[in-house]
Image: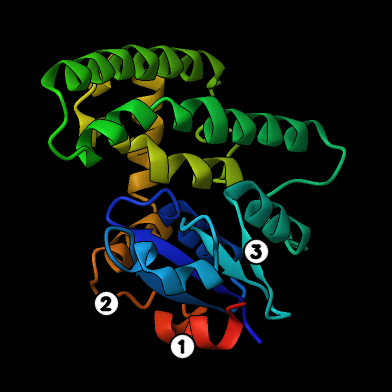
Amino acid sequence: MEPILLYGFPSGSSMGLVAALEWLGRPYRLCRVDMLGEMREPSYGRINPRHETPVLITDAGEPLTETMAIAAWLEARDEERRISFPPLSREADRMHQLMAFINTGFTGAFSPLWAVLEMEDADPVVQTTLRDFGHRVVIERHDKLEGMIGQRPFLVGERPSLADAILVGVARWRDVHEVADRERWPKLSALRARLEGDPAVIHATRLENGEPSPGTGALLGHVPLAEVIERFGR
């Protein structure tokens, strides 16, 4: 069977993994998950007990969770090195380093800001404190990433890799939370512009928005979440 990626909306970090599947070019299917509704239902826990996206149903029919684990699964099957680099190469090391930073400190910096948005009837003082702290941490993490970006078009080289895929779904959160000005980080801003203009990223964004997009033809269609849970849930 083809792998099935469960990706979340709105503004899910998993959007970048949809783009990675397009870059990879192997047949795949998708399952679009409402993170504000479906993902919170008890039945979703049969696919991921932590009630998070993304989840990959592998070609063996096994649910695989966590972004880095899914990226490693894709890398291991990237025989033509379309989204990764030869093992033990300098480029592979740099890709893994950037992926780790983006998926931990960079992504985690937004947690206080998401907490504010999800609060119900929260103390305004608590909200202000969290928002101020979140802005400071997000800016600091952006400063660090800006310093890690080199002079090449993408994070590791002349073409997008898994590092860029993990970045593109999360970098737009700066816009959601209106943290500083995008142009404060010129290298990151230019990289985002290149990625957001990439056909695979445009394809992934349209799908996330519920719009039709054929992509390259590697996408074989969407599978309803209820069917995924029934077939592969535990």
Mark seen at residue 88: none
Residue 204 visible in the displayed image: no
Q: Image quadrant of residue 94?
A: top right
CA–CA distance in space, label 1 to label 3:
17 Å
Residue 91 placement, left or right of 164: right
Residue 85 visible in the displayed image: yes
Q: How many marks?
A: 3
CA–CA distance in space, label 2 to label 3:
26 Å
Instruction: Give the residue pinned by disc 3.
Output: 64
Residue 148 placement, left or right of 12: right
Q: Which element is circle 3 on?
A: strand
Residue 52 placement, left or right of 10: right
Instruction: Give the residue pinned by disc 1.
Output: 227
The crowding category of the residue bearing disc 1, from other C-alpha atoms within 10 Å (few below 14, some 14 to 19, many at least 20), is few
In this view, 40 is above or below 175: below
Which residue: 35% across, 15% down? 139
Along the line of sight, which residue is nearer the eye, 49 or 201? Answer: 49
Of the residues shown, which amino acid type is indicated by label 3? Answer: Leu
Q: Residue furthest right?
A: 88
- Of the two numbered discs 2 and 1 on the same chain, state the one appearing first in sequence: 2
Of the residues shown, which amino acid type is indicated by label 1? Answer: Glu
The crowding category of the residue bearing disc 3, from other C-alpha atoms within 10 Å (few below 14, some 14 to 19, many at least 20), is some
Instruction: Give the residue pinned by disc 2.
Output: 212
x, y percentage for residue 205? 31, 59
Q: Image quadrant of residue 44?
A: bottom left
Residue 134 placement, left or right of 145: left
x, y percentage for residue 7? 43, 63
Of the residues shown, which amino acid type is indicated by label 2? Answer: Pro
Q: In which quadrant will I find the C terminus?
A: bottom right
